[in-house]
Structure formats: structure tokens, C-alpha cells
Image (tube, rainbow, N blue to C red):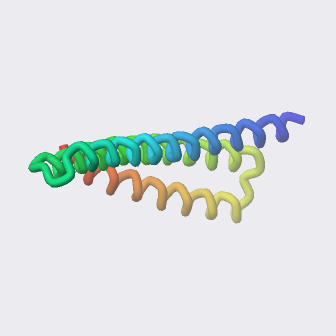
Amino acid sequence: MLDEIVKFLARVVEFVGIGIILLGFFISLLRWFYFFIKNLEGDNFYKYTQEVRAKLGLYLMLGLEFMIASDIISTALSPTQEKLILVGSLVVVRVLIGFFLGRELKEIN
């Protein structure tokens, strides 16, 4: 019973992360279209595009954090060696993505 509740909570946390990424994508896409239409050939177009990229990067990083939390929660139930290696590698990949996204966001700002 407890295992099922924890698995369910891990899935909820994972879907929250996916939802954050999708929300950020759609918000960023709408903002970019707005800036594109407003400044079709304006001088500030590059600046606005960088702003949109920075906001999207923040959503991506937040969503990845939720997905990492979900992996950790699901592994805590039955930590077999195979699952620990799989989750460890996923966490490493997601942390590296987050690190490089963070670096790029600092460069943009």
C-alpha cells in the first residue's frame, strides 16, 4: 500500500516537471511570436529573443529539478543495484543539462 502511494507521488512529481516544461515552452513561444510580430525588423529583436530564451531556460531547469526529484523518490522504494545505476546516470545527465543551461542563462543575462 505504501509502495503504491509513493509510486503515485513520484509520478505526480514527474508530471509536474513535464507540465512546467510544457508551460514554459508555450509561454516562451507566445512571447517570441509577440516580439516577432511587434518588431519584425527592429533593432531590439535579438534582445527580445535572448529574453525569451532566458525565460525558457528557467522553466527547463525547474522542470528538470522536479524530474530528478521524481527519480530519487521512485528509487527510494526498492533500491536495487540496477535501479541505482539507472537513476544515477539519469541524475548525472539531467544535472549536466541543468549546469550547462545555467551557464548559458548567465551568459544571456
> Residue 66: x percent and y percent?
55, 41
Return the x and y of residue 19 as percentages of the image width and height: 57, 42
Q: Nearer the viewer, residue 27 or 18?
A: 27
The residue located at (60%, 38%) in the rendering is: 16
Q: Residue at x 56, y 42 (%)?
A: 17
Residue 97 percent location from the top left of the image: 41, 57
Q: Residue at x 69, y 60 (%)?
A: 83
Q: Nearer the viewer, residue 15 or 38?
A: 38
42 or 76, which lies in front?
A: 42
Question: From where the camera sits, is residue 33 visible?
Answer: yes
Q: Residue at x 69, y 49 (%)?
A: 75
Up-down relation of residue 73 to residue 92 (above or below): above
Whole-percent x, y for residue 5 in the image: 81, 35
Please give the count of numbered marks on the rendered protein: 0
Depth check, front residue: 86 or 9: 9
Q: Is residue 37 left or right of residue 6?
A: left
Quarter of the image that includes the C terminus: top left
Residue farthest to the right, as pictured: 1
Q: Which quadrant: the N terminus?
A: top right
Is 100 left, or right, of 2 in this rendering?
A: left
- Residue 49 relative to residue 84: left or right: left
Residue 107, visible in the rendered structure: no
